[in-house]
């Protein structure tokens, strides 16, 4: 157990030490490819634009288990607030600190090392193991896993299971796994009024005043009630602007940006129609640009979820809660392959934050969990 933990820690540190803000990979994938090549994986590099992707596979028989992950990370933010450099993996207080320690370089290290030890014990395992890795998860996500999925479809690669290393846990390792995600729909609203002198409001049309009631109504709508696995659809306004830069001008336009995190109970087109009806009912002169950044998906728990549950219970002595909360993930693309999908990774408490970290014990246990999943599915 100590050896497997040290191996995972060493690889995680090497990955964190490579600065890889989206879409830059920083050499992380070369490190993973070297490790997988030494384990007998065949490698297919699949770059698109500035994004690096690769597909690695060991074996040709079914069933096929894919590990999915990303080497890119978000920017570190205020460097002076980090207790140690964000792109230098640093061990202190029984934790590993650095950008990507939780999201998701530690999970990548755990997957690779779990595979290494599984293959030592079972070099002639059944089925096949694959790695689908991208450097475009934290950004636009247009040239990453979405392109890998297109490649799989063209090559008739049909996975049975896909295990994503996102930071799915909440308070402690293994307390939560993701079996789906809500969709994400952005709206960019422009309400058109008429600019004028603030002393002569009768000669202007104030888009701020005109918008108040409509925007308030949008925040009060119950879009749906969710279900057993999905929380209700939420609507959030995250930006409003109408300032002209002068104190004596009524602005001519108001812009508002909002987002839906939506369950399958409220399809994107239905949400758009309801928004338009509310704005029309308030007689606004407006236009909206919509951007759908992710459809919701749900993967009914089956053999992979059971293997994850059994491994977590064995290693962590807790039972995971399967849910669909949180932001979007690359699972929304992989769902098109028709395979069972589970997200299982470190606690998410520090992701995208200053002093991002993972407990050393969690890194070791996560590696052991992945190894047990391999044992249950492919031995």
Image (cartoon, rainbow, N blue to C red):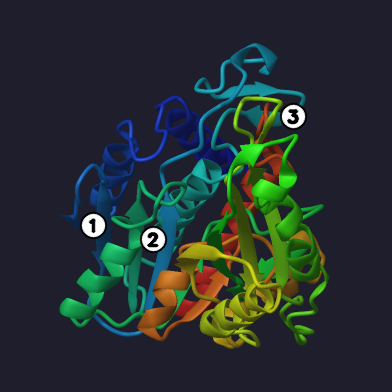
Q: Assign a secondary structure to mark 3.
A: loop
Q: Nearer the viewer, residue 39 or 326?
A: 326
Residue 40: numbered disc: 1
Q: Assign a secondary structure to mark 1.
A: loop
Residue at x 59% of width, y 43% of height: 195
Q: Position of residue 309 (x, y in %)?
A: 69, 74
Q: Are marks 2 and 1 in contact (CB under 8 Å)?
A: yes
Is residue 228 positioned above or below 318 on the image? below
Foreground mark, 2 or 3, reads 3
Is residue 361 positioned above or below 297 on the image? above
Earlier-in-chain disc, 3 versus 1: 1
Q: Extreme top residue here?
A: 80
Is residue 238 positioned above or below 20 on the image? below
How many neighbours does mark 1 have within 10 angstroms: few (below 14), some (14-19), or many (20 or more)?
A: some
Residue at x 47% of width, y 71% of height: 332
Foreground mark, 3 or 1, reads 3
* Residue for badge 2: 119
Q: CA–CA distance between discs 2 and 3? A: 29 Å
Q: Position of residue 70 (x, y in %)?
A: 42, 50
Q: Nearer the viewer, residue 160 or 187?
A: 187
Q: CA–CA distance between discs 3 and 1? A: 34 Å
């Amino acid at each position: 157990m100590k050896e497997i933990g040290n191996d995972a820690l060493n690889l995680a540190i090497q990955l964190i030490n490579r600065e890889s803000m989206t879409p830059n990979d920083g050499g992380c994938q070369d490190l993973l490819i070297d490790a997988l090549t030494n384990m007998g994986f065949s490698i297919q590099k699949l770059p698109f634009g500035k994004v690096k992707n690769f597909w690695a596979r060991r074996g040709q028989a079914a069933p096929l288990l894919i590990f999915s992950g990303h080497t890119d990370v978000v920017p570190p933010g205020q460097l002076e607030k980090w207790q140690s450099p964000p792109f230098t993996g640093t061990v202190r207080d029984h934790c590993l600190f650095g950008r990507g320690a939780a999201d998701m370089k530690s999970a990548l290290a755990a997957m690779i090392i779990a595979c290494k030890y599984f293959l030592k014990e079972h070099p002639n395992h059944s089925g096949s193991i694959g790695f689908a890795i991208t450097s475009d998860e934290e950004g636009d996500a247009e040239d990453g896993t979405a392109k890998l999925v297109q490649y799989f479809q063209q090559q008739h690669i049909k996975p049975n299971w896909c295990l994503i290393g996102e930071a799915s846990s909440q308070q402690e390792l293994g307390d939560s796994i993701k079996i789906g995600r809500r969709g994400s729909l952005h709206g960019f609203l422009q309400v058109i009024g008429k600019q004028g002198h603030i002393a002569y409001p009768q000669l202007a049309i104030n888009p701020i005043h005109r918008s108040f009631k409509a925007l308030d109504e949008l925040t009060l709508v119950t879009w749906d009630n969710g279900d057993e696995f999905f929380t209700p659809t939420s609507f959030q306004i995250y930006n409003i602007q109408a300032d002209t830069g002068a104190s004596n001008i009524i602005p001519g336009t108001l812009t508002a940006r909002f987002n839906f995190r939506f369950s399958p109970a409220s399809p994107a087109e239905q949400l758009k129609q309801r928004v338009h009806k509310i704005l029309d009912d308030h007689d606004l002169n407006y236009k909206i640009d919509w951007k759908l950044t992710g459809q919701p998906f749900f993967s009914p728990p089956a053999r992979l979820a059971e293997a994850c549950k059994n491994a977590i219970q064995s290693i962590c002595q807790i039972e995971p809660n399967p849910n669909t909360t949180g932001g979007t993930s690359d699972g929304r693309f992989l769902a098109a392959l028709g395979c069972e999908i589970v997200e299982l990774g470190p606690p998410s408490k520090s992701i995208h934050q200053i002093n991002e970290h993972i407990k050393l014990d969690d890194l070791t246990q996560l590696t052991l969990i992945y190894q047990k999943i391999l044992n249950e599915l492919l031995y």
